[in-house]
Amino acid sequence: MIEIGLVGKPNSGKSSFFKAATMIDVKVSPVPFTTIEPNTGMAHVVIDCVEKEFNTNCKPKHGYCKNGKRYIPVKLWDIAGLVPGAHEGKGLGSKFLDDVRQASVLIQVIDTSGMTDNEGKPTTNHDPSEEIRFLQDEIDLWFSDIIDRALKKIGAKSKMESKDNVVNMLHEQLTGLNVSKDQIDRAFSDSGISDVRKFATIIRKMSKPMLVAANKMDMENAQKNFEKLMGIFKEMLILPTSAEAEIALRKAAEKNLVDYDGKHFQLKDGVDERQKTVLNHIQKVVDMYGSTGVQECLNKTVFQLLDHIVVYPVEDENKLCDKDKNVLPDALLMPNGSTALDMAYKVHTSIGEKFISAIDARTKKRVGKDHILKNGDVIKIVAAR
């Protein structure tokens, strides 16, 4: 399962984002370091399910499907707040950085209102661009320190080895960072290892790609700061977000006060004047940005940053079901460019090992192990018994 780490300074709204995405009650407080141990929970990315195309009704084993939208689970980590100097152990830096190892992609939640400083303390007119810069710097310095120690451990031996052997040795030393051999090889080709900091930055960008959730967009000064961020960080994916608005809408939907589809909402009967005032304020945020931004952050993290697609394995390519007659039971998130064989291994190692061929449920054509999958493919794997 894809693991997404929520990172940022204290009091940026990480725990609110986590609650908005998972609806798990966690401690949300303006006090710095509210989160010490990482909260973990299940969130979902949302796609148009292929059930409509095939004129059927799916029965997911994981996640769920509602009104033709497939909700596919991903794991979310709310990691302790980071402050400048974390790589030297300041604040909860060591704990934060150790937790970051486990994530394959990061969402940095920032306080776009500028009402808190880099340590999460109340202030006014703070520049949120500083949050983005120092967090990247802290992770880069941490990576750099680990890579530097690894190179010293390899020592003079590396100078006598081929590039491939150096990459292999580095991979052995950096397994704890969840960095692949291919990523190390590409970083080595791009920059070499003489400039450790540059090498570390490239590795970080490859192994921990990051989206910025510009949170607290419902507050004063947020729009002005957001526009500045978009001008400064033109190569970064930055999305306007209001985690508090998302929490309010989800709670209102639970109480049957609104119809909410994760993007748009409509008031229902029984809403009192106080509730209407709050919801009308949220409506202005949704009208301005198209949504609260929480679901968009999750979707773009998986489908744009990680470049994943969704494929559906079935055992019966005609009825689109598994052996228990569940229709379209699984929706797998896989890297774009994955093959039919990759999918077989994803379903189960033994199926991958016994792979014979695959059948495309749309065309009914048989394809080989090197067949490149497309988003929305429905595939039957044929394996030896």
Image (cartoon, rainbow, N blue to C red):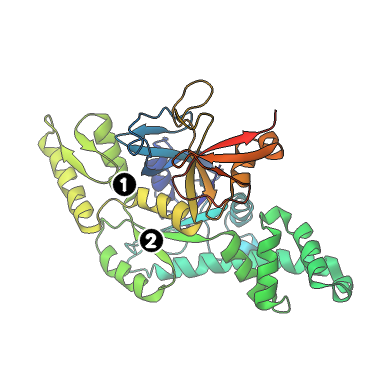
The first of marks 1 and 2 along the sequence is: 2
Give how far across and how far down residue 235 sits, in percent.
Answer: 44, 72
In the image, farthest residue toward the top: 324
Left or right? Give the position of 255 relative to 36. left
On residue 262, which mark appears? none
Q: Amino acid at mark 1?
A: Glu
The alpha-carbon separation of the residues under discs 1 and 2 comes to 16 Å
Q: Is residue 361 above or below residue 127?
A: above
Residue 243 in picture, x, y percent from top left: 34, 48
Quadrant including the C terminus: top right
For residue 92, which quarter of the picture?
bottom right
**Where residue 353 appears, x then y in whole percent?**
71, 39
Residue 79 appears in the figure: no
Whether residue 57 sits left or right of residue 286 in the image: it is: right
**Label total for image:** 2
The kind of secondary structure element at disc 1 is helix
User: How packed is label 1: few (under 14 Cα within 10 Å), some, or many (20 or more)?
Assistant: many
- Mark number displayed over residue 116: 2
Q: Secondary structure at mark 2?
A: loop
Q: Nearer the viewer, residue 206 or 277?
A: 206
Residue 11 in percent (x, y) is at 42, 53
Observer-side mark, 1 or 2, equals: 1
Do we see residue 377 in this rendering?
Answer: yes
Amino acid type for the residue under numbered disc 2 = Thr
User: Which label was assigned to residue 244?
Assistant: 1
User: Residue placed at 67% from the left, 56% from the top?
Assistant: 177
Q: Crowdedness of circle 2 by 10 Å Cα count: few (<14), some, many (20+)? A: many
